[in-house]
Each structure stands twice: as C-alpha cells, then as structure tokens.
Amino acid sequence: MSIKRTIHILGLAFLLFSVASCKKWVEVSPKTQIEDLDFYGNEQGFKEALNGVYLLMGRPAQYGRELTFGLADVLGGMYVLNTSNGSLAYRDAFAGLYTNAATQNIINSVWANQYNAIANVNKLLQELERADTTKFLPKNYHIIKGEALGLRAFLHFDLLRLFGTSYAAGGASLPAIPYLKTYATTVTGKASSAEVMQMIFEDVTKAAEELKNDPLLTGETITTDMDNGYLMNRSLRFNYYAVKALEARAQLWVGATDKALPAAEAVIAVAGQKFPWVAQSTIATSNEAARNRVFTTEHIFGLFVNDMALNYTDLLDSSRFQTTLTVNSSRLTQQFESGSIGAADYRLVYLIRNLSNLPTPKIFFGKLYQPNGMTEAYAKRMPLIRIPEMYYIAAECLKTTDPAKATSYLTAVRASRGVTAPLSASLTADQIQEEIRKEYWKEFPSEGQLFFYFKRRNGTAVPGVNGTYPSARYVLPLPPAELEFGF
C-alpha cells in the first residue's frame, strides 16, 4: 500500500478505531470521511482523535506485535528459529530473504500502518492549527499538540531505523524515507537520513515546548474529578519525558553523544521519583496473575494494547502452534551469563516461561504473558521506552570521557535486577560497550530494541547468525507499491 493510498483511506481508519474507542465516532458520519466541523468542533473530538492514534499504534502490524516481539525481535536474533519453530515468514526475515512473499507482506504492513498512524497525527495537527483554543481547558490544547508532535517524531524514527541505512554504515546522506508533515493526498519523496533526523529533532523541540506544563513534569496531582482524569496515567501518553527519552535515542543514533547525554540524564535525574525501579516483591510473587512482568513503574512511554493476549498467543505461548517463537537453555545460558553472574538475575528467574511439562517442551520469554485474572495495573501494557535504556545511553556516551561514571550507570541497572556481581572499576571503553550490549540482550526481549542496537552500531555479530552479519541486511526494502511513485 502506497503512502498516497494510505492517506486516502484515513477516514476509514478513523471509523475502524472508533469502534474500539467511542460510539460517538461511528455516529458522526456514515461516510468514509468524517465531517471535520462536527468532529473537531470541540475539545472532545481532539481528545478522541489522539486516543485513536494510540489505538492504531497498538495494532499487530505496529507495536502490538511486529515492532516489538514480532519482526523486530526476530531480526535481532532474540529467538532460536528452525523448521518447527517460527513461521516461514519470520525464518525468511531472519535469513534476510525480505522479498519472499510472506515476509514482504509483513514488511509492507508495517510500512502502511505506520504511515497511516502518521497521517492521522498530521490530520490532528492540521485541525489544531485552525482550532478555537478558547474551547479547550487550560493546558489541554498544548498537551494534545505536544503529544501529537512527539508521536510524529517517534513514528518516523522507527520507520527510519527499519528502512534507512544507519549512520554507522554511512547512511546519513542516502535516501531513506518520506517525512510527512501535512495531511494531503500528494506524494512525498524520500528524504535523506540526515534530513529525516533534522525534522525529527525539530518536532522533538516543539513537542518539549508544548509539554512544558505536562503534569508529569510539573508534579501537579491530577484526580478523576479533574476533567474526568484526562491528564492521569501519563506513562501511557507521549509525555514530556518520553520526548526527552526519544531525543536521547535519536541523538545517539546520529552519534551526537554530547547531545544524547544531557537528554538521557534529564530523565535519569527524576527516575527515582517518577520512574522508580520495579520492586522485587511485585515480580517475585508466586501468584502468576499478580506478577509485574513488564516493570510498569519504569515505563517512560508505553501503550495499552487491549488485544495483547490475542496478538501473542500463537507466538509466545503453549506448544499448540508451529509458529511459536522460543529460545533454548543453551541460548539462555549465553544471554544471561547463567553461572555466578546471572543466576539471580530477575530477568532470567521471573520472566522466562519454561514449559517443560508440555508434550513438546518449549521455553518462552514471558514478559508479555497474560494469565487469567491478571492484576489490572499490569495487564495489556506494552513498554516502548523504559528507564534502563536511559542508563545505557548515558553509559555509552561516557564510556571514553568518564568510564567510572559510565560503569556506575550500568551497575545501577544490574543492581535493580538482582545482579550483585560488581563490574571492574578499570573497564576500558570497549569493555563498557560490551557490557552495554549484554544488557540490551538481557533487558529488552519482547520490546524490539536489540535489533535497533545492532543496527545503530553496524554490528557484525547477531545471535544465531553464523559468520558475519552483513550491513545490507539491516535495511528493509520499501514496499513494491512505493516504487511506482519513484521512491
């Protein structure tokens, strides 16, 4: 599906996610195009439009599967694939056979759905520019706008990380992806990675300014009596600190450690108060339904995915399916250094589901497991940015200039995971980087970040790959339909 067609079906997309969000959406207009004056005539319409974007992002083609525990984790070598484990599409993807039909369909769907979400964001931003701001409660206009700008940058950045060549591989000046800033039916050509990143940074800067009164930043207490609690649960929205975390990610992507470090440390500085380490008691409980597997206290930004169990069941649960994505004991030993170092690691002890009692025993990453009766505060949560990543980014930025502080950041994360074995105080920059690599592998199963780490570093060694991982395999091909428009 081309970008041009994606924008044409925007109205249909609105109707699709309206069913899940608010009956009023369906009642607005029976046509595929929503009547703008009816829908955007008051603040509630803008709120619902933004909620709709979050719902779109939780679809299987995006962060509900493919950009987290699905395609992204497959590409990062997170699983052990063979003919009885993993679909043909995923096995072909891991082998770099991206143009094979089933794999190409997944890639095309990621592209189309991601741009469809961007089109919805651009429509919202367009309507905000001509909205009567007096119809908004104090702060809401700017917070809605700030979230939308941040989401536009976030969505484009992940497209770039998939379809563009990394800076480490010389991709800064190469054509990458279109950056869409307007809601229109015209075709937008590809921009270079450097041009895309410049526009991402512009949106990040604007988003931070719009979100300067975000309650998560100011510390204002929001209750259900205040605008029905609209500004509560900020970690499920693209809040101010999500903007700073995205800035840290993006600046590190381009190699600007001098800018990535202050962005990451701005989040770290408030972590104890706003994003505290998960308490061991909430993940060590023997009650499976009460276990906080996704470490919700550490979420800087995440999604509520209503269909999470449906999205992962055939991939990360039971032995009923040949498409399951599993690991084995030898891989876990390698991943978690399961001797004296990793034996007590919470991420190994509590987040691995070893179903040895099944007719076909299988080992799954259990971070997203949704048992019956699961504690509501932990259920259906998809983490997209968490506080440990900010520590890893800060450590990488400091590994040469202040290795002691870099090591202290890694030690903080390890201690929060029950790993008491100390890191040497005399680690070199290369050794610190190796510890960071290990941490990404341990910390981010089911979140898709390991592949992006390898790509950013232009890594030549990926788990499960024999020999050198070729740089070309890091770049996914654009959908064939896009080539019709000269992309």
Image (tube, rainbow, N blue to C red):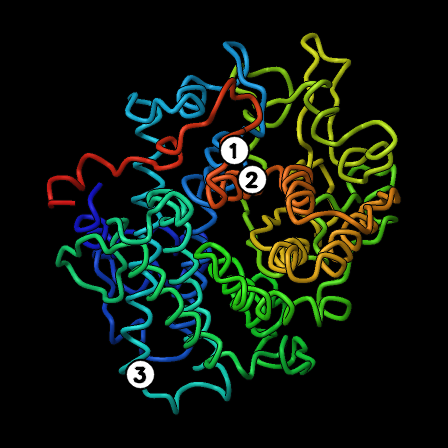
- SS at mark 1? loop
Could you tell me if the residues under marks 2 and 1 are in contact, i.e. CB atoms within 8 Å? yes
Q: Is residue 237 visible?
A: no
Residue neighbourhood size for the residue with mark 3, other residues' Cα within 10 Å, grouped as few (<14), some (14–19), many (≥20): some
Mark 2, residues whose alpha carbon is within 10 Å: few (<14), some, or many (≥20)?
many
Residue 354 lies left or right of residue 198; in this view the side is right
Q: Position of residue 143 (x, y in %)?
A: 48, 77
Q: Earlier in the sequence, mark 2 or mark 1?
A: 1
- Residue visible at 45% across and 62% down in the picture: 51
Q: Between 334 and 180, which is closer to the camera in this rendering? A: 334
**What secondary structure is marked by label 3?**
loop
The picture places residue 150, in percent across and down from the top left corner, at 44, 67
Measuring 39% from the left and 87% from the top, which residue is drawn there?
135
Which residue was labeled with disc 1?
76
The one of 264 and 276 positioned closer to us in this rendering = 264
Residue 207 falls left or right of residue 487: right
Element assignment for label 2: helix
Mark 2 lies on residue? 450
- 124 and 100: which is toward the camera: 100
- Residue 173 appears in the figure: yes
Q: State the CA–CA distance, disc 2 to disc 1.
A: 5 Å
- Mark 1 Cα within 10 Å, few/some/many (few <14, many 20+)? many
Specify the amino acid type for callout 1. Answer: Gly
Which residue is at 21% across, 52% downward?
Answer: 190
Q: Quadrant of the N terminus?
A: top left
Up the image or down, 404 lies above or below 63; here it is: below
In whole angstroms, how far apart are the C-alphas of marks 3 and 2? 41 Å
Residue under numbered circle 3: 131
